[in-house]
Every structure is written in structure tokens, then in C-alpha cells.
Amino acid sequence: MDITRRNFFGAAAVAALGVGSASALGSLAGCAPSVSTEGDNEVEKTQARELNPQDETYSTCSDNFSALFEPLQMGSITLRNRIAKSPAGSDTWAPDGDVLNANFLDYYENFAKGGASLVFVESSISKLMSYKPLEQKATGWLLDDMSKIPEKMAPVTERIHKHGAYAGFQLGVGMLQEGTTTITDMTLEDIAWFKNAIVELAVQLKAAGFDVVELHCAATQILKFFMMKRANARTDEYGADTLENRTRFICEIIKEIKEKCGQDYPVQILMDAVEENDQALGNTDGFLTIEESIANAKAFESAGADSFYLRLSVPGMHIAQFAPDLMFTGYKCEGTTGFGTRADFSRHFEGVVEGRYSGCGLLLKACAEFKKNLEASVSCAGYMDPRTAPDLMNNAVANGEVDYLMITRPLTVDPDLPNKLQAGKRDEIAPCCRCMHCHAKGGPKGYSSDGKEFCRVNAVTQNAYTDVMPEGYALPTAETPKNVMVIGAGPAGMEAARIAAMRGHAVSLYEKKASLGGLIATAQPFKGGHERLGDLIDYLSHQQEVCNVEVITETEVTADLVREKAPDAIIVAVGGTRDSRLEETDAVKILSVEGLANAETGESVVICGDGAQAIDCALFLLAQGKHVQIVSETEKELIDKEQSMWVRAFVVPYLQAQGVRMWHNTQIESIVDSGLEIVLPTGEAKVIECNSILECYDMLPNTSLADELGAEFDVIAVGDCAHPFNIAQAIREGNLAARSV
């Protein structure tokens, strides 16, 4: 029988492949047609196997947090609970001259004050080298003169110890870029120099009051490269040919730290649990297996390591190593990588990556395997958030899957998380939305008003002690209590009301709809479950009650109503407006963002716009099986500009990989009978055929009410009303406005 492309997917496939192969065909992800033997090679299209199906119950809460507040022995120290601040990036470390600045000290003290048992300082201030492996060069602030470390760093350990927590320090050993630099040509003298420098740094840090040190042996650190068979081509005793040789350097460091600092001085190892190349998923040749990683860990434990902190290694996309839940961002594209591909967590990474919980507890399976083989304590990265998943986290500790939780982002959102959780006030913990604005230095042109990213929920983090918030973390009490009227209960308005009330003002919050949330409520169905915008609405809504804000709903505020109430200060947060340029025809329907969730769109949709709302809608439509194209009037660098640069790095390649055509620098003309007429940058006119068009341009300011009231009252316009952009900027503007009244 001749096998053509047409009949291959019909009855011919069964004969050509055999019965066993035909069964296999139906098990391939994305390749699961139902084969019919009747008719003219008729093929019945069926849904492909769903990748990484989600368990939406992972956030259940039984109000039992007992396991999280049990003590834990780690070497010579006893942690008061199982919640630690991990040594992840904060953008707060920079010293002022020869001393640590107030931001640095307050930042770390807040975690200890909030109830964390162990607070790690990240390695940013102690780089042993930069990107040139053969330069015996100390580039970090702490390494200018190690003898000064005790004096320099004592203030931060004193701040941490004051609140009953222990202080840890992550020893960064220098970064290499795989494929461009190598450790193979390092001399034995180079190795000895690095070892001595690391050990001496640990000695001085102990003298400064640090109770634990962590060796960074993951990501692109030099120590990891000694363990990598594909990167270590040495032929001496530090080569990768045997387990003993490839772990030798790290074992020697552990032993010498123990000799110099005391055998009971805790040493933690940050290492990869398992790795896979996300640029070519399934290509595991030469990549670290969990079995090999456990063998490495056993060697380190024998050398004296007291604790292990596990990360996921994804060489092709570094950010996924410390924020692996980014692979779950976007609507219904769980497992996406920075290359547009999708990991199947039941098959990739040896099946030890937990993909059911939207990135939460991602390495719990791996941790459990390590726990079976080690006596030392074990923790892991991967959104270990007891606020979002209290039962999951508590049970993981209680069942022995993990010993303690290493957390950064949820603690930077709310440093009081441990204390609030223990006090039974989970509903008062500010939720981390996993938006990743906190981890980036800035976005593309036009990203934000001041060119930087900052925490979406906690407007103080990354803004304290800056020009916009020189008072730092403290919230000043109002000198003269006022009657403050806040108009609009979106994120900007609710944050403004919360902060104004906390300062001592009498606050009334007006909303024209029956419920609070504003545009967040509209965005929620398009974002999906990962960013948990419902939690943010619930938190901000509950804060109005906690702070005694008077909430008035189903009331549209007019200038006459304001005059009747006569407030001392007004904060207007009524949201922005939307532009509409096109008129629908009988053949082409116009869609709105607000009505999209329940709209009949047809099979082919063109989205006019390129911001976060447009991209979120594109993902939503793509998940419904629609053919989506995006028309942007700006350059491609601004696509999805309101999102974190890291979210864009995952979502945009995914859209492209799914066949979403993006027309950049393209002029939108009009609707013709068959679709949307556009003009390309070349000047060429083109018609994109479609069934419907979603108008999703950047929002416009809406200051008419604020302008009308400005001549009579003290008025501040905030959020999309004044500067349409994103939730993070809206909340910050609301916070700053409330500080100023």
C-alpha cells in the first residue's frame, strides 16, 4: 500500500505502524487523533492529552500549621520554626561607602521581626570573581579586605539576632557561563586560592555573627561546574571521571570550614536536584540526574554538610532555576519554557518535578527522594508559600518530605507572614502573586514611570529609602487626622484607603459596582489561577474591614456628592478609559475585554493592542482553540510591556511557538468585509481575515472628575485614572498618595 500524507492518519496508519505502534500514536502529547476505519479515510479530531493537569485544591487550609512551628536542629543551632528567608535576590544589598545602609539593615531585620527562624543574606556582596575564571580576583564588597568583615557585617547579624532568629550567609563563588568559559584550565594553584578564599570568608563571617554559611553549588557557580561531566574535562584529581573526583573540591571546602569554624558550625549546600535542557526538552545527555545528585549530596554529608537547599536546573533559561513557577505563568500553558516549548512533568526531569500545583512545591518529590538517603536537613526552592498552600506545606513537613521552607518572594510581600500564620491571621497576610516584578532591574523603554520594577503587592519593598519613599519601611502617623474620601475600589483605591486609615485618617471608600476589585476582577479569568488575583482582591477587601474603612458600594460619585460630603482630602482612583476605533460589520464582530470571557468569537480572532491585557487575552483565546493574531502599532520590544520582563520571557515565545502571528509597527486601518485592513511598516496594505476583533489598546487616563474637583478640594488622581499601566504601579501610586494626605 502506498502511504500518503492524507491516508497515513487514517486506516493506513494501523497497517503501516502495526497495532502496537498505533496505540503508541494515541499516547503522544499533542498527537492523539482518533483513527476511524470507515468512510474516505475520515479522521475524527480529538483533544490531545492535557499536559500537566492542575489540582486546584492545592490551596486548601484546615488551619493546622503545627508542623511548621516545630523546632528543627541544624548542626549546632535549633531553629524555632520551619520557615526561613532564602538567600534569593532582593536588590537591597548595596552598601553606602564602608557601611551597610539603612535599607539593607531594615530589610533583613524585618524578616527576623516577622518570625522567620533563619534569615539568609544573599551572596551579591561577596563575589570571589566575575566571569573570567582564571583571574584570582575578589570583586565583591566584602572581599576588599576580609579582616574588616566582622566590623562591617556585625550590624546586620545583631539586628537579626535581636528578634530571636539566626543569621545565614550565602557564599557565592563566582559565575561562569556554560559554553563560553571553562574550569578545565584552572591550575591547582588557582583551585587552592579559591578554596582558601572561601574558607577565610566563612571564618570572618562567623566572627561577624553569622550562624550558618551556605555554599552556592548551583546555577552558573564555579563549584557546580566541577560536578558537571559535560563541563569538567579535567584529567587530574578534580576531574569528573569519578564521583570522588567531581565532589572533591566542595568536600575539601566543607572539611576546612569545619576545621576552622568548628565541627558543629552549620554548613548548608545549595545544589541542583535534577536538570534538563529546556532548549531541547528530552535531551538529557550529560545532564544531572537525581540519582547522581543524591550521590553528590551523600558525599557532601560525609564531609560534614548539615543541610541541603535544592533547586531546579534548567540550563537554557537561568531564571527558572530560582523561580521555576514561572513555567506556570500564562493561561493554560503550564510547563512553558523560555523557548516556547512545554515540559511534561510526568516525563521530563525524571518525573520528580511536581507539576500539579501551578509551580507551588515544585521540588517536593525530589526532596522526598533526598530525605530517604540523607540524615541532614533538606529544603527546596519552588514557591514554598504557606500562605497560598497552607495544608500542602504543613503536610509536606509533617510527612517528612521536606524539613523546612526556604522562602523569599512571599516574605518580601509580607515579612510578618510567620507571625500572622502562627496567630491564625492567614487572611491578613498579603499574598504574593508570583508576578516576578520584584526580580528584575527594569523593563523596556516605556516600562514604568521611573524605569524599574518593584513588588506588585507591597509598595514598600524596593521603594523604601528611595526618592519616592525616603522614610523607609516605617509608615508615618498622620499629624492631623482628616476625613479622606477614596473614589474607586480597584487596587489603587483599596491600597490608598488601607494606608490612609492605618495612618489615622477617617476613610470612606466609594465604588460604583456592587463588589470591590476593579480591573483585577476583570483580569482574573484571563490570568488563570497562577497569579491568584482572587487572593489579592480578598486581601485588599479584608483590609478595609481590618482598618475600619467605611465602604460604600453601588454608588457612582459625582461632584455634587463630594460637595455634600465635604471631605478634607480626595483620592480619585476610578480607572482609565478604553479607546474604540473600529465599527463591526455583519461578518466581523467587535469584542471588548470586559465581555470576552462569555463572547462568541468565531474561530479566528485578531487582537489590536500589545500590552499585558492583550497578551493575557491571547493566551485565553489560544486555550479555547482559537486562531489568534496580534496587531501592534509599536516596536516588538514593547510587547507585553506591563508584565515582568521574566514573564514576558516565557509567555511571548510560547505564543510564537503556538503560531500566534504578531504584526509590529503596523497601522490599524479599518474593518473590511473579510477582516481587518492594516498597513505594514513597508507601506504595504494587507487584510487579515478573521471572525472577530478584540480592541485592546493601551488604556487612557480618565481625570475628568479629579479635574472638576481640583479647584475646590485637595485632590490626587492615582492608578489607571492618572497613569494607566499595571497593578504594581497602581498600588504604589495609591500607597504614596495616602502617605501624602
Image (spheres, rainbow, N blue to C red):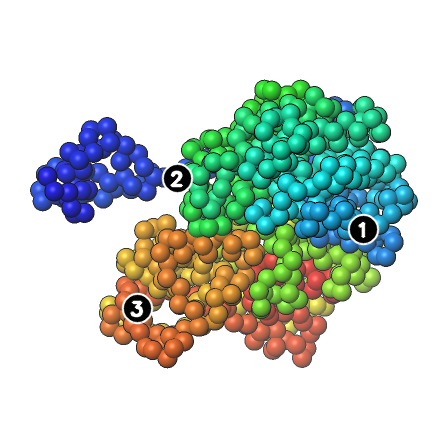
Three-letter code, disc 1: Trp
> Looking at this view, is 292 or 702 the one in front?
292
> Looking at this view, is 574 or 166 the one in front?
166
Q: Nearer the viewer, mark 1 or mark 2?
A: 1
Q: Is residue 193 left or right of residue 643?
A: right
- Quarter of image, res 372: top right
User: Residue 141: which disc?
Assistant: 1
> Looking at this view, is 202 or 475 the one in front?
202
* x and y, in percent, of residue 158 in the image: 86, 40
- Quarter of image, res 416: top right
> In the rendered structure, which disc, 1 or 2, sits on the residue that comes first in sequence?
2
- Quarter of image, res 573: bottom right
Cα gap from disc 2 to disc 3, whole angstroms: 31 Å
Q: Which residue is mark 3?
A: 688
Three-letter code, disc 2: Leu
Cα gap from disc 1 to disc 3, whole angstroms: 56 Å
Q: Is residue 543 left or right of residue 51?
A: right
Where, quadrant-wise, is the N terminus in this rendering?
top left
Decide if residue 21 is in sight here.
Answer: yes
> In the rendered structure, which disc, 2 or 3, sits on the residue that comes first in sequence?
2
Three-letter code, disc 3: Ile
Tag 2 near tag 3, CB within 8 Å: no
Judged from the image, the secondary structure of the residue bearing numbered disc 1 is helix
Where, quadrant-wise, is the C terminus in this rendering?
bottom right
Cα gap from disc 1 to disc 2, whole angstroms: 46 Å
Q: Which residue is mark 2?
A: 51
